[in-house]
Amino acid sequence: MNRRSRRSPARGVRRLGVYVNVVYRVASDADGVTVSTDRAFLLFASEVGRLVGGTLLFGRTVRSDVPSDYVFPAGVELAELPHYESLHHLGQVTRALPRSVAGIWCGLDRVDTVWVFGPNPFSFLFIVLALARRRRVVLGVRQDTMAYTRARLHRGLWRPALAPMAAMDWAYRALARRLPTTVVGPQIARAYGDRPSVLPMVVTLVRQADIAAPSSRDYGGSVGLLTVGRLDPEKNPLLLVDALAALDRARPGRFRLTWVGRGPLEAAVVARARELGVDQLIELHGYVPFGPELLSLYRAAHAFVHVSLTEGVPQVLVEAMASATPVVATDVGGVSDLLEGGAAGLLVPPSDLEALTGAVLRVCDDRNVRESLIARGLELAERLTFEAEAARVAAFVRGSRAGGRS
């Protein structure tokens, strides 16, 4: 899988190397070898690579009998790099460094363009090695690095990371002045200078065939709310529990919440729900990978609610719009750009309980508002399909000006 050829890519070969600081799982059985990950984003990245000419993923690898949630299609290759738990495990990182350098260097034999997502220490190492091998380098940015770090600062292990993250963020922006760069959403594009060499993109797995028709949900009785996201501090999950309790006080027995996701705050969510007396109104599904089961949950919900403190452009909002489900979301990161300032979903300030509950009630009570949000959301989802966005980003990665703006 990780061939150690010293040859340069054959003339005319176009294969895209993709580096993201994640873990890949390699499983072997009688049918062969499967490569998988728990990050849905990488299915989008691998499709961009396929359209360029082929995908070679670079990343930390573990062997397992059971694949992760997302299995890559046939044809996606993996350049295996040594595993370490995280960048905070400095001893593991130090021991992995020599083999990481060797793995990246040899893997670069098999590509002529690399798409490097950062900033993180290994992304800079990858860029240096790729430029030394005269490979074309495209940068990738998935989120506002500093906003994401600050949202986690109350967790002690993140506080010492603020200064080095600020330095890496500055260095990545400096590199973006010279290298083509993809960013998730117009908000980050503006932060990176909004130049022709900076392409804002929307990451989605929603295919054209997944777009739903408008449905006639009954809002006169029980109302099912849906949220999809990690139970992490930057996702602000306790606010959603407080909102459900406020809605139950306003309309006793009408609202229920389906929660898809997992994370370190799950116990805190359960405890808060029990404390507020709404634990019987919440159904925790754990993680559900993108696919028919998840789409059925979107299509069954009366409203989708997203309450993060920091975001790029959430995939879940595109999934909700494509399912003809009205959206209520906090106005952070690229959310307002995606929802066209409120035309495709109601925007509320972050951590504003009153505004959040008011927006949910408005969606439920005002048919005209609801139908307008659904109609505009479906129009946007039609434009932002997996096929369309992957093709647009692939054109940019190849060096074509056909990438355009989303």
Image (cartoon, helix red, strand yellow):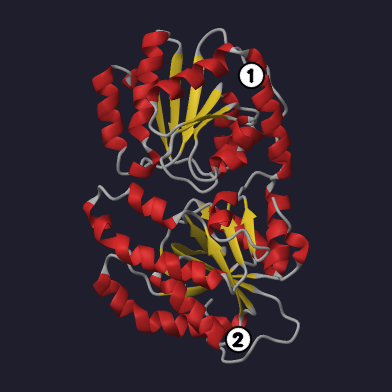
Q: Which one is in front in this view, the residue at disc 2 or the one at disc 1?
A: 1
Please say if 336 is above or below 274.
Answer: below
Tag shown at residue 134 = 2
Q: Position of residue 370 (x, y in %)?
A: 63, 20
Residue 108 in picture, x, y percent from top left: 56, 82
Work out whether residue 62 or residue 181 is closer to the camera in this orientation and state it: 181
- In the image, residue 94 sits, relative to residue 317, either above or below, namely below
C-alpha distance separating marks 2 and 1:
54 Å
Which quadrant holds the N terminus?
Answer: bottom right
- Secondary structure at numbered mark 1: helix
Q: Residue at x 40, y 51 (%)?
A: 147
Name the spot of residue 154 as percent of width and height, x first. 25, 47
Please say if 223 is above or below 351.
above
- Kind of residue indicated by mark 2: Arg
Within-10-Å neighbours for mark 2: few <14, some 14–19, many 20+: few
Type of amino acid at the residue the image marks with label 1? Val
Q: Residue at x 55, y 58 (%)?
A: 42
Q: Dot 1, how many residues are within 10 Å of its Cα: few (below 14), some (14-19), or many (20+)?
A: some
Left or right side of 168 for 362: right
Mark 2 residue element: loop
181 vs 330, left or right, is right
Q: Nearer the viewer, residue 179 or 278?
A: 179
- Identified at 73% across, 57% down, the residue is 404
Residue sticking out furthest to the bottom = 6
* Residue occupying the far front of the picture: 193
**Which label's residue is closer to the chain start, 2 or 1?**
2
The circle drawn on residue 369 is: 1
Of residue 285 and residue 236, the one placed in the foreground of this image is 236
Residue at the spot x=56%, y=11% of the render? 365
Query: Residue 85, can we see it?
Result: no
Percent coordinates x, y for residue 119 in the rendering: 44, 66
